[in-house]
Amino acid sequence: MSIYLNPSEWNLKTDGGIPYKLMNGYPTGSIDDEGSFTTTEAYIMEASSLSAFITESFSPTVYTPTRHMPGQSYNYTRSISFEPFPEGLPGDPFGAHVGIHDENTFAQFVKVTIQYKQGEEQDGADPSTFVEIAADASVEVLVTSSEAMKWESGQPIIEVDLPIGHLCPMTEWTARWPRIPQTYINTIAARLRQYMGCINSTPMTKLYGAEAGTILFSGLSFQQAFIYGGGPAGASIEAKLLEKRLVKRTEAGTTVYGHNHYYNKKTGLYERIKKTDGSFIYPEANLNLLF
């Protein structure tokens, strides 16, 4: 393939109008038995177009998807690498060196390698489609009381208030906003703080229907980031959501208890406790509004 043609006459152009050539042997890709699909493309483009291509691929605008692979709308750009092309000459794609920039001094083109990864469809009008959800399992050891209990044989428990350990399944959920420009950080942080310390009053759609009362918004993680091209600093923000799910199964059905339920040794049941003002330990809120 000859690249020494007028780039304005190249057939392929990005959505932003940048001419490029697809290198021989590309795209390449792989897919595994879990459905994870990754692909790689390699382009040749003018060195002077590199900065514009990076900005097109990773827009600094809030809730804008990264550039997707042509023909694969669910394959989003995850990383870009570049090098001078052809080999044998230094590169100066950012104009750092003042002087003669003919083809014998600096490479006039760059080889750009783009790594894509399959993801959910992202809609700029729906911020919830940009949230990345992850979860990790854990347990909490609850100590109950034998006061209202007896052995399966029907015999009373002789020990005075025998402590009985009970492992409660817990799930630590993380909702991550990976690319937030500086101008939106205060707005998003203020909205998240509004619900910190609350439990969900309604099922959590983003957490696959977690029942009311089982999700506690326990806090935030924050990581400063910087936008390509010297733009304003941004950040990634993570919301930590702790799911507590105590389950009671009977012939009549299943009952799920959450963060506001505590063991009452007099009744042998998990019950909510009211404070002197009539409220429960954790305030309830519609945590779906976090997204």
Image: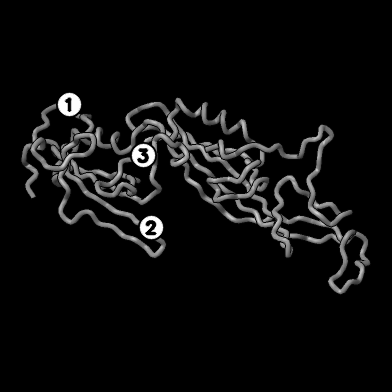
Work out which residue is located at the far front of the displayed protein and give it.
252
Q: Amino acid at mark 2?
A: Ser
Work out which residue is located at the far bottom of the displayed protein and give it.
153
Q: Residue at x 47, y 42 (%)?
A: 131
Residue 90 is at least partly visible in this image:
no
Q: Is residue 15 left or right of residue 249?
A: left
Q: Quadrant of residue 56?
A: top left
What residue is pinned by disc 1? Answer: 98
Residue 238 point in image, percent of width and height? 53, 40
Q: Is residue 258 left or right of residue 90?
A: right
Query: Callout 2: 10 Å neighbours few (<14), some, many (20+)?
Result: few
State how far apart marks 1 and 3 are (Cα).
35 Å
Q: Quadrant of residue 217?
A: top right
Residue 1 point in image, percent of width and height? 8, 50
Please name whichever residue, 240 or 150, is drawn nearer the observer in this view of the structure. Answer: 150
Q: Amino acid at mark 3?
A: Pro
Q: Amino acid at mark 1?
A: Val
* Secondary structure state at the residue bearing disc 3: loop
Q: Earlier in the sequence, mark 2 or mark 3?
A: 2
- Badge nearest the viewer, 2 or 1: 2
What residue is pinned by disc 3? Answer: 65
Q: Residue at x 63, y 43 (%)?
A: 202
The image's mark for residue 36 is: 2
Q: Quadrant of residue 198?
A: top right
State how far apart marks 2 and 3 are (Cα).
19 Å
Q: Earlier in the sequence, mark 1 or mark 3?
A: 3
Residue 101 point in image, percent of width and height? 12, 31
* Secondary structure state at the residue bearing disc 1: loop
